[in-house]
Image (tube, rainbow, N blue to C red):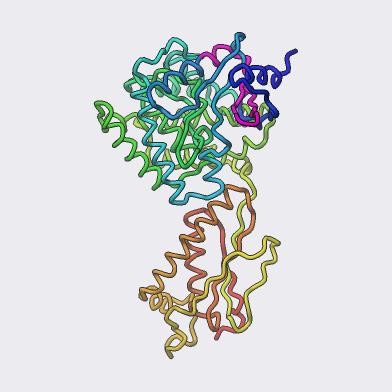
Amino acid sequence: MKDNSNVLRELFRSWSGEESIKAEELPASGSDRKYYRISSRETQAIGAWNNDLNENQAFISFAKHFISQGLPVPEVYLADDSGKYYLQSDLGDATLFSMLAEEGLTNHVKDIYRQVIHWLPRFQIDGAKGLDFSVCYPRAAFDKQSMMWDLNYFKYYFVRLSGQGFNEQGLEDDFTRLTNFLLEAKNSFFLYRDFQSRNVMIVGNRPYFIDFQGGRQGPLQYDIASLLFDAKANLPNDFREELLKLYISEARTLTDFDETEFLKYYYGFVLIRILQALGAYGFRGFYQKKEHFLQSIPYALDNIEYLLNHHHPEIYFPELEKLLRSFTQSEHLRSYAKPGLKVKISSFSYKYGIPEDKSGNGGGFVFDCRALPNPGRLAEYQNLTGKDNSVKQYLSAQSETGLFLASVYSIVDQAVENYINRGFENLMVNFGCTGGQHRSVYCAEQLSAHLNKRYRLNIIPDHTQSKSWPT
């Protein structure tokens, strides 16, 4: 049996004319392909091995075509005669998903997403021109059979393995209605198929695109649905809406685009993409016992809940909807989420010092509220606290308070999103004022309400001076 790294090193030597000094196998992804970073003293490339010759042919053919169209994809340098090995340009290790996990949804990351949206319709519309769709694998088009494969993938690997009972004939009837509806959409474009944040490489703050070997002819809606409802990316709904509008604006510059018709089918494609993803999580998680795939399930269920309640597709699918709503309420399926982030929010008096962080995480944020107007100096508020309505009304009416809290929300939101994505379990936020009774209490209560609503946390602020409050 051939050693993959040795074959790729020979291919590297044939291409570069240099001897490799290192061939490092890269971490496995969701596929059976193997990748190696091969280096000489002067040159570097990514070597790929894949036993599926048809898939390799599709990737190499598409890559050459996209390069010719000026689209940012890796260049294929050389393939061996067997068709199982090839070399491509090394785009580094930073993906859009890893950047999102490290930074949170910062303005920088948002800008990268906007660049991605700029490129997507160019792959779909310009990239489809002159493309050899005959090399598409396993199907030349996202047709009825492709859709039914995805829906049955969902049925057999997620629904059945989850243990949820269902009416199979009713579900099949809904699958037929859904596919017939989606097949009404225009489908003469390049459908990337797996357009999501892990397949976007970031090089010098510019996106490059990989893993398009499953592409085929299809509608525009599927890929933008894949990106915006990428479960683990967990984009806020308002940012999804912003990106969807940007996508429509970009697509309109490239082709005759009917926004009403596009949106008629868009949320149906969101639905089938989520179902396909659940099938993948079930296959990799329930069947192959790769537990980290199961952690994506709760995010996908959140997307389903949002879709059904706010953007219900324009078709009737009673058995499927019943099943999906039962999944969104399943404590068992929700339990696959990573341990939740615990945010401790405290108010305190500077007379007694900053509360100790007992979580072991160390530190967190300390915000000094003493620059805000002090209700404690006014006789009518002296025996009240920041939890009382009259004090809340007083502080909320001060412009300084709004500016202060807006800054706090921005800073803490960034940390919370980053901590959630990285699996951290503890964050501490403290608000201090002179007596720990009015301003710090009000701000701690406001931040708790903000985080509970935005991130579905369950924070009850700890008011460390409460025992000394007037009764």
Q: Quadrant of the N terminus?
A: top right
Residue bounds of the magenta highlight: 32-57
Residue 464 in sight from this viewpoint: yes
Q: Is 91 left or right of 218, judged from the image as shown?
A: right
Q: Quadrant of the C terminus?
A: bottom right
Q: Does the magenta-highlighted stretch encompass residue 327?
A: no
Q: Residue 275, percent across and down?
A: 50, 29
Q: Residue 330, percent across and down?
A: 58, 41
> Residue shown at 35%/44% (left/top)?
242
Q: Residue 210, percent across and down?
A: 51, 28
Res. 327 image quadrant: top right
> Residue shown at 40%/46% (left/top)?
239
Q: Residue 370, percent across and down?
A: 49, 80
Res. 189 image quadrant: top left
Q: Nearer the viewer, residue 21 or 130?
A: 21
Q: Is 115 left or right of 353, judged from the image as shown?
A: left
- Which residue is outermost to the bottom? 379
Q: Is residue 422 above or below residue 128?
A: below
Q: How many marks?
A: 0
Residue 471 in sight from this viewpoint: no
> Residue shown at 38%/36% (left/top)?
117
Q: Nearer the viewer, residue 396 or 38?
A: 38
